[in-house]
Image: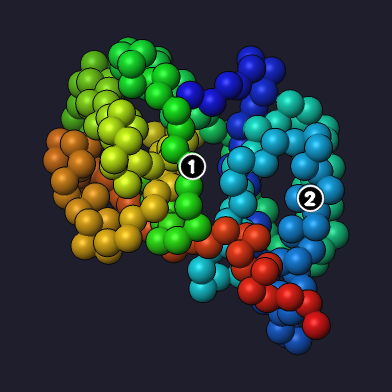
């Protein structure tokens, strides 16, 4: 489990470059994004940096100990050009699972390391009309146990890295899955979809590591 102190806040950051009449030099802009991240790496822990495949968009997950430094990071991104920044607080999924009463033997397993190939982002919106609070908690707990259990088996290839949005019924999952057939099964085989599938929306995006995009697209 990630070691996150009580003074550290976790944030999801989305940066989308907006089209202009003269077009976008996306390669140059993304080099600027990486350079900006690098400049703040000593004061902000950047857990993940991804380029959304096929979109002028970068997403990142950060552990922030100084909100003012984080604000300066946002200001620096705004200096790159016209863009849309979205930011919201999250919690490491292991802390959420702990709140649900999931056993320590699952909660304290090491967080898997994401690899660069076959990388996907799944964004879950969970509603629960007609269910009581206790039913909701039990549903979340069942899903958390299912999501964390693959980490106990070192031979399992697919073990997602997960984050829960603060005070929202939204979960972000990052996973390496070489089989699109198996990835598609998330829509109907995971417990929360079996129990509550009519009330859940999943959005899926393909990702690559920002560094891999930069390496493949050097500035001329």
Report if the CB atoms under discs 1 and 2 are less than 8 Å apart. Answer: no
Q: Is residue 66 above or below residue 21?
A: above
Based on the displayed image, in which of its 4 quarters is residue 11 positioned? top right
**Residue nearest the viewer, comparing 55 with 201:** 55
In this view, the residue farthest toward the front is 155
The residue shown at (50%, 57%) is 116
Q: Secondary structure at mark 1?
A: loop
Question: Coloured how?
Answer: rainbow
* Label ID, residue 38: 2
Left or right: where 113 falls relative to 196? right
The residue shown at (28%, 33%) is 153
Label 2 CA crowd tier, 10 Å (few <14, some 14–19, many 20+): few
Q: Is residue 117 above or below residue 155?
A: below
Residue 168 in view in this figure: no
**Residue nearest the viewer, comparing 180 with 199:** 180
Where is residue 117 shown, x and y percent of the image? 45, 61
> For mark 1, what is the residue?
113
Q: Quadrant of the C terminus?
A: bottom right
Q: How far apart are labels 1 and 2 at the CA level?
A: 20 Å
Left or right: where 24 falls relative to 146? right
Residue 80 in view in this figure: yes
Which badge, 1 or 2, comes first in the chain's sequence? 2
The residue shown at (79%, 63%) is 32
């Amino acid at each position: 489990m990630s070691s996150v102190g009580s003074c550290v806040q976790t944030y999801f950051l989305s940066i989308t470059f907006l089209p202009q009449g003269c077009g976008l030099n996306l390669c140059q802009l993304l080099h600027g994004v990486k350079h900006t991240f690098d400049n703040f790496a000593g004061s902000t822990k950047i857990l993940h940096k991804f380029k959304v495949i096929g979109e002028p968009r970068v997403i990142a997950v950060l552990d922030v100990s100084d909100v003012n430094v984080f604000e300066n990071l946002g200001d620096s991104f705004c200096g790159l050009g016209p863009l849309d920044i979205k930011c919201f607080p999250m919690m490491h999924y292991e802390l959420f699972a702990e709140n649900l009463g999931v056993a320590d033997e699952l909660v304290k397993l090491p967080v898997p390391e994401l690899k660069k190939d076959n990388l996907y982002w799944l964004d879950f919106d969970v509603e629960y009309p007609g269910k009581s609070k206790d039913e909701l908690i039990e549903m979340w707990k069942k899903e958390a146990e299912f999501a964390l259990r693959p980490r106990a088996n070192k031979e399992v290839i697919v073990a997602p890295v997960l984050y829960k949005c603060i005070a929202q019924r939204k979960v972000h999952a990052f996973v390496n899955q070489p089989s699109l057939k198996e990835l598609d099964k998330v829509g109907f085989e995971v417990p929360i979809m079996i129990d509550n599938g009519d009330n859940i929306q999943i959005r899926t995006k393909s990702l690559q590591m920002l560094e891999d995009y930069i390496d493949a697209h050097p500035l001329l």
